[in-house]
Image: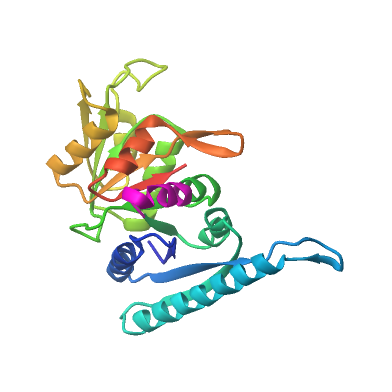
Amino acid sequence: MLKDLFFPVTGASTDDATLAIAEQIADAYRARLIISVPVAVPEAVAAPWGFAPGPVLAQVLEEVEIRATKRAEELRRRMANSKIASDVRMDRTRLFDAPEALTLQARYADLSVIAKPRGDDASIAHAFFNAFLFESGRPVMVVPANIASCRFDRLLLAWKPTREATRAIHDALALFSPREVEVLVVDPEIGDLGHGDEPGADIAAHLAERGLNVRVTRRPSGTMSVATTVRLHAAERGADLIVAGGYGHSRMREWVLGGATRDLIESLELPVLFSH
């Protein structure tokens, strides 16, 4: 069961709304909410007297730390009025590298919660999502601005017979102990090298052994993308949470998301739990 939830303060305009959702999830599962405010540390640069931050950079970093301290104090006052257990802390990062640095802290929690990429904040959300998904070793939940339920009893599994999807559904089961799981197979590939002779049947049988109410749906995407098909089906079924594998590959030290993963996080209307 979910015990601790990690929320990184990204500096995006969506932070407060996303924090409110993380707080509601923590309350629903009686979990502790860990809130991390990143603060940059000086980078050493060559100087006549040795290695030290340049004077201009040092002033910038001092202002950054003042703002971070103020933000942390604001959050502590806010959480003092909350009924959930929480920990607001400042975590040191390299300048301009908060997403990568905070992945270390995300490893010490069951789940991280970040906002859906949107508007001017999309690049920030993508940076945190990519770093957390591929580097934290923990599942990541991406949430829209508002969600109907903070308890996840009805899951929709966007199933592919891959390591990522397998890990995602088992992460979700361990965290939320749901009642129902619908296995959705979009554009199934029948055969040994695809989804098997009965796409979705094997994972459904495995989940049913846990006492879950499981159903399998096979659906063509038609003229829609896979992500749109998953999203619309989840809405039709009244799912609380979409569960999916997060796919990507490395190139030049950057993570490039697979098309379906990127489409899903950018168009989601329900929370989505991703694992890699």
Q: How many marks?
A: 0
- Residue 5 percent coordinates (x, y): 41, 64
Question: In the displayed structure, would residue 129 be above or below residue 66?
Answer: above
Direction top: furthest residue: 191
Frontmost residue, 17 versus 31: 17
Residues drawn in magenta = 115-129
Q: Is residue 241 magenta?
A: no
- Residue 276 percent coordinates (x, y): 47, 41
Frontmost residue, 193 versus 17: 17
Question: In the displayed structure, would residue 194 be above or below residue 116?
Answer: above
Question: In the displayed structure, would residue 41 be above or below residue 268?
Answer: below
- The quadrant in which the N terminus is found is bottom left
Question: In the displayed structure, would residue 117 be above or below residue 151?
Answer: above
Q: Is residue 118 visible?
A: no
Frontmost residue, 119 versus 213: 119
- What's the residue at 63%, 71% (across, down)? 59
Majority SS type along the magenta span: helix
Q: Is residue 217 visible?
A: yes
The color scheme shown is rainbow
- What's the residue at 30%, 71% (across, down)? 27
Residue 4 sits in which quadrant?
bottom left
Direction left: furthest residue: 236
Residue 268 sits in which quadrant?
top left
Frontmost residue, 100 versus 175: 100
